[in-house]
Image (cartoon, grey):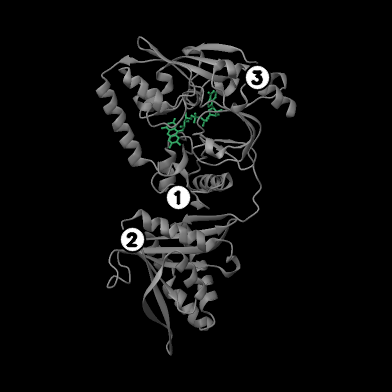
């Protein structure tokens, strides 16, 4: 590696080369371990010099554009990564043709075309990739696709030679181009557009941007659509219909806004995202027999998990027997010191029979989630709004009605994951308050909720046995 680095430093300016570079900031997912070496060339000549050095050391680099379609694993990438986002040396027009370097963002490319009164790239305005990455992926949106405008591509091969390909040679197909096979590096793209009215072009771009912003979870880090469109279906619709919106592993989650996106809500690892991807694949296959394939390119080295995986998923009708048993088990653990087995059984039979649970799951003002630790069902959450018990005291309140975790799994972060989920649901609605009840002797829970801004506002007595009552503290937190 040292002799390679020395040779690279002679070929390009040292400030273009980083050693042991974190890749997360180079991806829209904001995820990824380090690259041994990361190089950001600024010209085709520089890139060719780099490729000659790499070739003579028999090193094949990996190419990154803006990292908007990749999931780099937590172990990072061995060898050399070339990031082309600074390759922006050429931008010009010739009649209705524009020629641009591969490192420009698609936003910059479509804005340039608009300024030049050229139409045809409006569809690309919101795709957050580089021009090179868009050609590689044959990116597309709203009935437009790169293959409709690209007429030529210049690319550098592994020996550092420059080639030109015309349209017929590019082998465009759905999210595919010839560069998937030949591993050459796209450096310059020629696009044929039509004369247009700049105002009309701008209006169309604004319309598509608005559409995208209203449908996609752009407020969170992601790599766009996680799965390819399976033949005959739309991945997002299939995932939504299977009730998998909100399925999460740590801070990685199937977006509540658009089921086709897995988002990083902050601090997710690649393992968390892969956990969500695998769980979705498993459940979609079980429910529909459809195998979802990731559209996101999964790269780099896996890092073994050292801790347990907590998966949170919305409960469905098929989960009722398991949910019923879980309710009984968690209640038994909590209340057996005060109740006989017969009393508890009578309570479960009335409160948690399958009909009651089915009604709860179907209720459109409540949601129930299940938590798994390494695939074992360990806890559940029920949230409720509309007819919250406190309505005489708190208007427009969201209730965290139950969070229960089996004792054997306390300390695994299950309660935290479920509470987090409850707060996310609360914050996505227009509620003034969140509230919950905590048994007066459960000091640990009171402290836990206190840390998240919950304060006592009232008390509620409930009957434990005919001759005994207990008290819940009612806690509230402002959501405004
Ligand atoms: C919020 C969001 C919305 C999105 N919406 C869309 C959409 O509507 N339509 C769509 O098609 N995609 C969409 N995407 C995915 C992504 O933006 C596109 O796939 C984009 O084309 C990837 O470009 P990139 O530069 O980020 O490539 P990267 O993610 O960096 O790389 C993707 C692949 O391209 C290769 N590559 C990149 N640059 C080059 C190059 N110069 N030469 C050779 N190979 C290269 C890489 O090796 C890698 O295999 C979206 C992503 C996000 C985050």
Residue 193 in the image: above or below residue 131: above
Q: Dot 2, how many residues are within 10 Å of its Cα: few (below 14), some (14-19), or many (20+)?
A: some
Figure quadrant of the N terminus = top right
Q: Which residue is mark 2?
A: 365
Q: Work out whether mark 3 precedes mark 1 in sequence or the reverse, and give the earlier one.
A: 3
Near-viewer residue (174 or 355): 174
Q: Which residue is mark 1?
A: 244
Q: Which residue is rendered at x = 54% and y = 82% of the image?
A: 337
Residue 171 in the image: above or below residue 289: above
Marks 2 and 1 close (CB-CB < 8 Å):
no
Q: How far is disc 3 from disc 1 in space, using C-alphas?
A: 50 Å
Q: Which residue is mark 3?
A: 11
Q: Is mark 2 within 8 Å of ligand 1?
A: no
Q: How far is disc 2 from disc 1 in space, using C-alphas?
A: 18 Å
Judging from the image, what secondary structure is the residue with disc 2 in?
A: loop
Q: How far is disc 3 from disc 2 in space, using C-alphas?
A: 64 Å
Q: Work out whether mark 2 precedes mark 1 in sequence or the reverse, and give the earlier one.
A: 1
Q: Going by the image, does 98 lie left or right of 24?
A: left
Q: Going by the image, does 305 lie left or right of 397?
A: right
Q: Which residue is rendered at x = 51% and y = 27% of the image?
A: 85
Q: Marks 3 and 1: which is nearer the front? A: 3
Judging from the image, what secondary structure is the residue with disc 3 in?
A: helix
Q: Position of residue 87 (x, y in %)?
A: 51, 22
Marks 3 and 2 close (CB-CB < 8 Å):
no
Near-viewer residue (103 or 275): 103
């Amino acid at each position: 590696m040292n002799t390679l680095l020395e040779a690279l430093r002679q070929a390009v300016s040292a400030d273009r080369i980083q050693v042991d570079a974190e890749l997360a900031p180079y991806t829209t997912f904001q995820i990824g371990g380090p690259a041994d070496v990361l190089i950001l060339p600024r010209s085709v000549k520089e890139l060719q010099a780099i490729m000659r050095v790499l070739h003579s050391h028999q090193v094949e680099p990996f190419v990154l554009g803006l990292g908007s379609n990749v999931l780099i694993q937590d172990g990072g990438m061995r060898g050399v990564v070339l990031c082309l986002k600074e390759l922006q040396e050429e931008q010009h027009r010739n009649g209705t043709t524009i020629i641009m370097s591969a490192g420009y963002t698609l936003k910059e490319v479509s804005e340039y075309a608009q300024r030049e009164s050229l139409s045809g790239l409006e569809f690309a305005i919101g795709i957050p990739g580089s021009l090179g990455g868009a050609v590689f992926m044959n990116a597309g949106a709203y009935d437009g696709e790169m293959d409709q405008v690209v007429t030529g591509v210049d690319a550098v091969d592994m020996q550092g030679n420059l080639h030109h390909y015309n349209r017929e040679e590019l082998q465009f197909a759905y999210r595919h181009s010839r560069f998937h096979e030949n591993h050459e590096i796209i450096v310059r793209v020629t696009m044929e557009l039509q004369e247009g009215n700049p105002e009309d072009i701008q209006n169309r771009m604004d319309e598509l941007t608005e559409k995208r912003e209203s449908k996609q979870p752009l407020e969170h880090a992601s790599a766009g659509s996680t799965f390819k469109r399976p033949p005959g279906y739309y991945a997002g619709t299939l995932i939504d219909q299977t009730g998998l919106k909100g399925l999460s592993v740590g801070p990685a989650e199937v977006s509540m806004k658009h089921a086709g996106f897995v988002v990083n809500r902050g601090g997710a690892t690649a393992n968390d995202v892969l956990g969500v991807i695998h769980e979705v694949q498993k459940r979609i296959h079980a429910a529909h027999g459809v195998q979802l394939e990731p559209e996101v390119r999964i790269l780099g080295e896996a890092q073994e998990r050292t801790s347990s995986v907590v998966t949170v998923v919305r409960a469905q009708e098929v989960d009722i027997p398991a949910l019923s048993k879980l309710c009984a088990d968690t209640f038994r653990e909590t209340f057996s010191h005060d109740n006989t087995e017969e009393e508890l059984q009578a309570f479960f039979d009335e409160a948690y029979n399958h009909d009651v649970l089915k009604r709860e799951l179907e209720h459109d003002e409540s949601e129930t989630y299940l938590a798994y630790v390494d695939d074992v069902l360990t806890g559940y959450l029920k949230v409720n709004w509309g007819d919250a018990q406190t309505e005489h005291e708190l208007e427009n309140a969201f209730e965290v009605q139950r969070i229960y975790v089996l004792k054997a799994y306390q300390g695994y972060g299950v309660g935290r994951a479920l509470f987090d989920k409850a707060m996310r649901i609360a914050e996505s609605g227009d509620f003034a308050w969140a509230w919950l009840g905590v048994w007066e002797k459960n000091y640990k829970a009171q402290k836990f909720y206190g840390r998240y801004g919950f304060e006592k506002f009232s008390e509620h007595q409930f009957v434990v046995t005919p001759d005994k009552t207990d008290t819940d503290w009612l806690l509230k937190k402002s959501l405004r």
